[in-house]
Amino acid sequence: MKQMIVNCGVKDTRMVLLDNNKLVEFASEQSSGSGIAGSFYKGKVMNVLPGMQAAFVDIGQKKNAFLYIDDVLHAHLDKQPKVKPSIADLLKPGQEILVQVTKEPYANKGARITTHYSLPGRWIVYMPEADYIAVSKKISTDGERARLRQLGSHLKQGEEGLILRTVAEEENDEAITNDLNMLRQHWQRIRESFSQKSAPAELHRDLGMVERLIRDVFNPLQDQLIIDNQERATSAITFLQTLLPANVDPPVSIHTEKEPIFHAMNIHEQLHRDFQRKVWLQSGGYIVWDQTEAFTVIDVNTGKFTGGVTLEDTVTQTNLQAASEIARLLRLRDTGGIIIIDFIDMDKETNRRSVVEALEIILQRDRTKTHIVGWTRLGLLELTRKKVREEIGGFSYETCTVCQGTGKIASWIKD
């Protein structure tokens, strides 16, 4: 069973997801609702740069959004030209286009946008112009995959694209059909807004954080939602009622005690431990987590652990435990981009494979796609994880005005 714990503050709303009483996700949203990933805009092309095969588009934000040529070509690879054209042949300055934000603006960079539109529902991801059908790879049974693919083929109209999500497994046809029809109505409203509004203009904003996470990770028949704000609880109940049968009550509890919900449920202490630079493992080993602008570096150490029969056994046990913990922390911290893991050197190839498999098992539970590239010649493991929103640390910590985030203070400052 999973528990979703929501703390509603004056400046922001924070949410944690517990899976068997263990933290697996943390999300934070400012009260202003500033996140725009997933939202649709009518934008105006400002600059077209053939040398970069990209364009900058004004969508009404502080910085122009970035549109790469691959996000302008058809979403179906089989329908793309064999020779990639110049972006100058596809877009012109002053042209008005419908775009969707795929990555939040960050630091001095504008948002990343695409013309490969997608609208996620509870059971389906609707792509109005993608022209293909896919079934989640996490649905392992061949019979169920075949059923969902056949249903998708029956429901698909024209150039539509459909992805049957993991939660669609064993779901009845009527519920999936209703979900698709609702998404079609959303798309129609977006198209109508595009024809009525002048660029730049927001046409559709994705759900708020709580509703979005309920839609994506919450099972209303098994899981529990605990929230400390009556108004937000009422909103969550209303949203859950659209996902539940008429005779089932939404599994929502309201925290009314004086002690803050994160303190009362020991969440605050766990977050503090899991977001440290140095995180201890149960065996006595530890990992060190360093973030740079370009990538994340994670170092694994045996620490106090000496329990193996041989050195190889000790090292492998530490690495296996570290692999599971790193996979959990990648999801919890929502770390994106390039990730380098320096596991302790192992002599046996079988042990190296076991470590990668341990990492993969936990990563399968993560909604964000992670790709394990492999081992480098120096024995480092390379990964990439999709980055959509600003790093969680950006919401949770403020950069020190003295050390500027290095963790070190120059000796002359102290004199």
Image (cartoon, grey):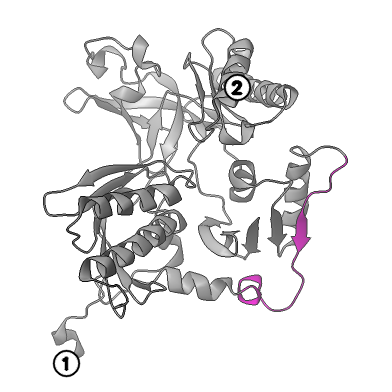
Residue 379 percent location from the top left of the image? 16, 54
The amino acid sitting under disc 2 is Leu
Q: Residue at x 22, y 16 (%)?
A: 86
- Where are the magenta residues, as a range? 247-265
| Residue 255 is covered by the magenta coloring | yes
Q: Is residue 264 above or below residue 220?
A: below
Name the dominant secondary structure of the magenta segment: loop
Residue 375 percent location from the top left of the image? 20, 48
- Residue 151 left/right relative to 270: right
Residue tagged 1: 415
Q: Residue at x 64, y 20 (%)?
A: 184
Disc 1 packing (10 Å; few <14; some 14–19; many ≥20): few
Q: Nearer the viewer, residue 158 or 394?
A: 158
Residue tagged 2: 148
Residue 179 placement: quadrant: top right
Q: Is residue 195 above or below residue 52?
A: above
Residue positioned most to the bottom: 415
The amino acid sitting under disc 1 is Asp
Q: Nearer the viewer, residue 199 or 32?
A: 32
- In what element is the residue under mark 1? loop
Q: Residue at x 48, y 13 (%)?
A: 131
| Residue 68 is covered by the magenta coloring | no
- Please state, as top left, top right, bottom left or bottom right, where the N terminus lies in the image: bottom right
